[in-house]
Image: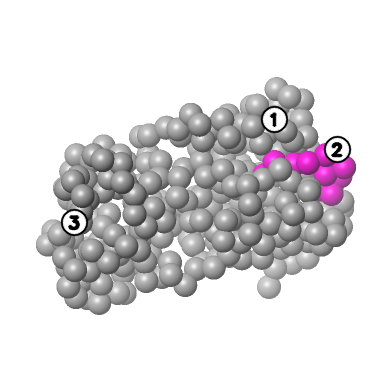
Amino acid sequence: MNAALPETQLAELISLFERGTVAVLTGAGMSTDSGIPDYRGAGTPPRTPMNIAQFTEDAHYRRRFWAGARIGQNSMSTIEPNDGHRALARLEAAGHIEGVITQNVDGLHKRGGTRTVVELHGGGGTMRCLQCGERWTRAETLSWFDTLNPGYAERNADAEIAPDGDALVGEVESVRVPLCPGCGGMLRPDVVYFGETVPVPVFEAAASLVERSTALLIAGSSLAVNTGMRLVHKTERRGNPLAVINRGPTAVDRRPALAVRIDAGTTETLTALAAALGA
């Protein structure tokens, strides 16, 4: 069971909202209580995520992606937003936050009720064709995988699930990869891979939330990704404070703008915050 948040820390967090509305930046730690493993949390094994060059240039990596995506879907279909996601939605509805900027691709903020969500790294629930640009849901394209690879999902149902929701599958060389039904082009998840940059309009939408806010609250992120730090720098240039809720160290722990630092889980902390603010 999670320990109660000390009253002094909760009071510090509440004071951040006395200045005005707050922008929220979330990372993988936001979704761990929904059952999605964290990439960089304490005790997690080292991971080497696939980069965009591997995906587009090497058929082995594409087979590995589709195999992992199909097996991972069995577990991801049971994933639901947690109380932390719902607390942020209530804070937004009550006018305390401008919206949520997330580094996650799991779609849980939208499903949890937040209306304004900027997905810095895209959404894992959508697949698009690199040639014609057409889009489909992930579930739809995985049904094509099943048609091309009968029995595969059943044979590999016990594979370990990785932090990105996909499975670590060994049997990949026989996999047949789905292609775009319209033009035969390569299909890819509509996310920002390692080796790619966040699209300019997406970053501008995130920056706009920061500019309309009086503080930036970082929840469940160590800020190891450069885009998140760019938003930190924008906050600092505006003379606004930072607050961090995260288990373990982050890249901003020694920055002068850091006003509140809570080493705790996002679910219990955000739930306590929303209750204290009457949301």
Residue 50 in view of the camera: yes
Can you name the residue that lies furthest to the left here?
174
Secondary structure of residue under mark 3: loop
Q: Position of residue 125 (x, y in %)?
A: 41, 56
Q: Which residues are magenta?
A: 13-24
User: Image point 56% across, 43% down: which residue?
Assistant: 118
Q: Earlier in the sequence, mark 3 or mark 2?
A: 2
Q: Which residue is mark 1?
A: 211
Which amino acid type is marked by label 2? Arg
Can you name the residue that lies furthest to the front here?
182
Coloring applied to the structure: one colour
Nearest the eye: 74 or 13 = 74
Res 70 quadrant in image: bottom left
Q: Which residue is mark 2?
A: 19
Secondary structure of residue under mark 2: loop
Q: How many angstroms separate mark 3 from mark 2 (CA)?
A: 52 Å
Nearest the eye: 43 or 272 = 272
Q: Which residue is mark 3?
A: 177
